[in-house]
């Protein structure tokens, strides 16, 4: 869509060059402001007949060069014969102005749609980020598997774990057995801990740290059968 000096495809291409949504919105809002100015000009009653604005000596009161240029183009396009006096009449010029006004309004609608789409995406990102921040941190009163598992079934809750990582890994393995997930892969245990537990500073446990302790326990306890009865079974 090309209207006056505006090319919709070039506008979309320009959007891809901006880094963030704020820059895109600023660019589109400036274009929307210009389009609104032109539309207001085209809709406003003119003091003189439209054909008068084809003269370089007469300017619009509103200072809308877009309308003046449109009128001048109509006289330039009628004929290349300097002796031909067929010029567009006032009714024809008004029809051309109405058509161009419709095109400007269509372009404005398209630009406003782009603004709304960017606004919706920004809102979705904000809500997503905000939901991540809304989280209840709980210090458990008991460390039994059933009690801990019950807490974690509550939405947006993370447990503050003040004991050792080894004890936490033991606990999660027991929870897995109690919930009949005894085929859980080792990496799932690490993910489960990182997603649901935090340290005393309410910081997420490092997956590398959890994996390191997990492997250490496998080598020193589970593989050697020295922890046949984890403390949480007792």
Image: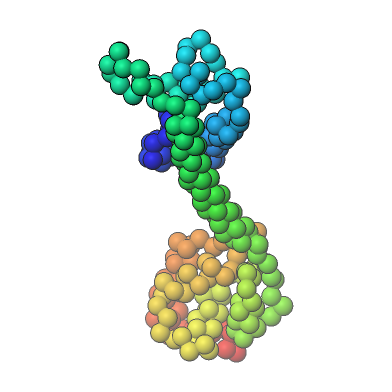
Quarter where residue 79 is shown = top left
Q: In the rendered view, how is the structure colored?
A: rainbow
Image coords of residue 179 (percent x, y): 52, 87
Q: Residue at x 65, y 64 (%)?
A: 135
Image coords of residue 132 (percent x, y): 59, 61
Residue nearer the viewer, 84 or 113: 84
Above or below for 50 versus 99: above
Q: Residue at x 47, y 70 (%)?
A: 190
The furthest residue to the left: 81
Above or below for 89 versus 2: above
Quarter where residue 18 is shown = top left
Q: Residue at x 40, y 77 (%)?
A: 185
Q: Residue at x 63, y 82 (%)?
A: 150
The furthest residue to the top: 57
Left or right position of 47 against 69: right
Residue nearer the viewer, 93 or 121: 93
């Amino acid at each position: 869509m090309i209207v006056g000096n505006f090319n919709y495809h070039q506008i979309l291409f320009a959007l891809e060059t901006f880094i963030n949504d704020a820059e895109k919105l600023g660019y589109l809002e400036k274009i929307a402001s210009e389009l609104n100015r032109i539309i207001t000009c085209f809709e406003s009653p003119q003091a003189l007949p439209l054909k008068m604005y084809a003269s370089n000596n007469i300017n619009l009161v509103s200072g809308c060069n877009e309308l003046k240029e449109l009128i001048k183009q109509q006289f330039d396009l009628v004929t290349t014969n300097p002796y031909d006096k067929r010029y567009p009449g006032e009714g024809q010029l008004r029809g051309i102005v109405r058509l161009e006004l419709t095109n400007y309004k269509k372009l404005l609608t398209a630009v406003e749609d782009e603004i709304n789409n960017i606004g919706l995406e920004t809102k979705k990102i904000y809500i997503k980020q905000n939901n991540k921040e809304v989280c209840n941190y709980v210090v458990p009163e008991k460390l039994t598997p059933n009690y801990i598992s019950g807490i974690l079934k509550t939405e947006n809750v993370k447990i503050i774990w003040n004991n050792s990582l080894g004890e936490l890994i033991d606990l999660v393995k027991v929870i897995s057995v109690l919930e009949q997930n005894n085929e859980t892969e080792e990496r799932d245990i690490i993910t489960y801990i990182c997603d649901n537990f935090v340290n005393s500073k309410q910081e997420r446990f490092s997956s590398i740290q959890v994996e390191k302790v997990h492997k250490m326990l496998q080598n020193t306890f589970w593989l050697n059968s020295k922890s046949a009865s984890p403390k949480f079974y007792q």
